[in-house]
Image (spheres, rainbow, N blue to C red):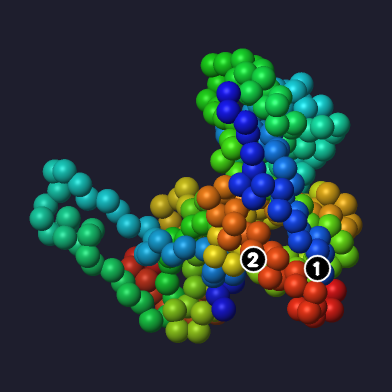
Amino acid sequence: MSEAVTAMQMAEFDGLCRVADAGLQGMIVLRGDLGSDALRSAVQDLTGAGVPKVRRVLSKGTFSVLWMSPDELMILCPYAQADAHVATLAKALEGQQALVANLSDARAVFALTGAGLREVVAKVAPIDMAPGAFGPGDIRRTRFAQVSAAVWMTDDTSARVVCFRSVAEYMFNLLRTAAHPGAGVGFF
Amino acid sequence: MLTLTCPCCGVKAEESELHGGGEAHLTRFGPGSSEEEFHDYLFARENAKGVHFERWRHVHGCGKWFHAARCTATLQVFGTYSAQTTEPPADLLATIREKRPGWSWRDFS
């Protein structure tokens, strides 16, 4: 197999917050009835984290389970293990109306770190980034300027942004512009 | 700015992360219908000034379709509700009656 690389080749930028290509990330998309026992136990058995509530993220060990829509989850895992986990999930959900796919290479993930990240995100996305309104454990799918993206916070000063791989360069340049050291607003 | 609450994911979404899907509660007339029915299904719209029912899609968010009731003149939003229905919920109609006495839209009033 060819050598896997990320779209932005580990680019990084330091400004109001640090913007960096988060590297290769295993991303498994699971669609189905999130309320069904079969799906819930399949996710629990694989990740140990369980199915998150609406717009929430559950993490355990190397796994994170992200609520994407009323019938869709995204499961994060180490890149090299994604195919094996897809096979495990597909076997556990055999006979159910569900879809499991490894979309690791279809997306780009960026890591934002630093106290300024709330401001950087709020500049380009229509999200209430106030500390009481959005925090660790929350996920929001929305637009970042002109492209669709999902953002969630892993702790108080770090967040992840995921978008389609085809718009990775746009996203990196957008975040870099919003995080320019001279562009601070000081709202939060 | 039009702000609609997506009933599927609960987000208070501003217009820019939504996509309008035109008038709601259309009855589809396909094969076997008369030419007039098919014409009306394709082209005849309420084009209301005032209370209007529309389809919207939370396109940058959860990706789901939903229905919204709003005033086209003032952008006042009366409510949003599931797309898996053929008519607006009774409590929403009651709210609109209270706020806009005498309104009507197709068979609803």
Q: Nearer the viewer, residue A46 or A85?
A: A85
Q: How far across and down, in percent of the image, does residue A76 sit?
A: 72, 36
Q: Quadrant of residue A23?
A: top right
Q: Quadrant of residue B15?
A: bottom right
Query: At numbered mark 2, what does the secondary structure look like: helix, strand or loop?
Result: helix
Q: How far across and down, in percent of the image, does residue B2 sit?
A: 55, 75
- The residue beneath circle 2 is A174
Q: Quadrant of residue B11?
A: bottom right
Q: How far across and down, in percent of the image, does residue B40 sit?
A: 20, 62
- The residue beneath circle 1 is A15
* Residue A151, placed above or below residue A89: below
* Residue A31, placed above or below residue A8: above
- Confirm whether residue A99 shows in the render: yes
Q: Amino acid at mark 2?
A: Leu
Image point 44% across, 64% down: which residue? B20
Tell whether label 1 touches label 2 (CB within 8 Å).
no
* Residue A43, placed above or below residue B108: above
CA neighbours of label 2 inside 10 A, class few (<14), some (14 to 19), many (20+): some
Query: At numbered mark 1, what does the secondary structure look like: helix, strand or loop?
Result: loop
Image disc number at residue B56: none
